[in-house]
Image (cartoon, helix red, strand yellow):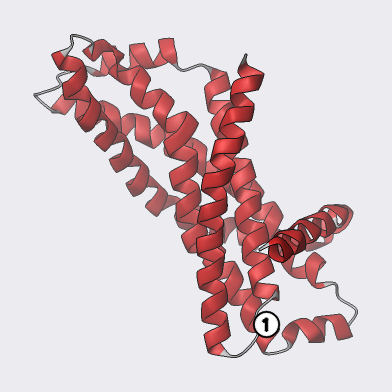
Amino acid sequence: MFQNVGEMILLFWKSLQALPVAWRQRRKILEQLFEIGNASLLMACVLSLFIGGVLALQTGPVLVERGMSSFLGGIVGLSMCKELGPVMMSVLIAGRIGSAMAAEIGSMQVYQEVDALRTMNINPIHYLVLPRLLAISVALPLLVVFSILVGWTGGAAVSALNQDIGVSFQSYFGNLREVVEPKDVLNGLAKSLGFALIIGVVGCHQGLSTIGGPRGIGRSVTKAVVNSIVLILIMDYVLTRLLMVFDH
């Protein structure tokens, strides 16, 4: 475990050192941006819509019983922008994109294409890792913003249409504006950037570490997804604690 963590930190450091040559890989960065961002919009929309709806459905009746239904917008708003939006979207991207990174790079490693790049004096970190890291670092925070907005809308729709809750759009969004501040959304974006780096580094590291044939590729994909999700949840606690300290 410690060896893997050390290798991932070293890979991340080498990627940071390669930033000055990122412009040369702009075409690959744009391709990865499309794959990570645009191609994930539909899943992000469906996931966020129902997360917001479930939040309103679970908390709405409890608040109505206690005469606090007017606070529903703020509760859903804070939950989506500070926790559920970044975490659930990162888990989704870890399953969809982290696995794809591990599979693509793992296949190249197994079939000696990475060795061929080195033979042609092409640095695999510049060519394979850096574009993916930069693309996911831009795409995931943008997806999280989209997820937050859709989740708020899903919560508002359930609040207004469910007879047991009966909170109007005006009351819902009025309370949301009172409770949710710009710094809360920025907290979610800061978390999503950290999660994006975790997904990118873990996926690329597992791909470059692949040994064996198709079975080895399958193991790398599984490890990439599982390790990413575990590290996301650990980092979620760490970042939440740090952000709470900075807020005070």
Residue 38 vertical position relative to residue 100 in the rendered view, above or below: above
Dot 1 falls on a residue whose secondary structure is helix
Q: Quadrant of residue 129?
A: bottom right
Counting every numbered tag in the picture gives 1
Residue 183 vertical position relative to residue 48 in the rendered view, above or below: above
| Quarter of the figure with the C terminus | top right
Left or right of residue 1, residue 185 in this image: left
Left or right of residue 93, residue 46 in this image: left
Residue drawn 64% across the image and 61% down it: 202
Q: Is residue 5 visible?
A: yes
Residue drawn 65% across the image and 84% down it: 211
Residue 211 vertical position relative to residue 22 in the rendered view, above or below: below
Left or right of residue 245, residue 73 in this image: left
Residue drawn 50% across the image and 36% down it: 145
Q: Is residue 30 visible?
A: no
Amino acid type, mark 1? Met
Residues 149 and 216: in front is: 216
Quickly name the residue at label 1: 108
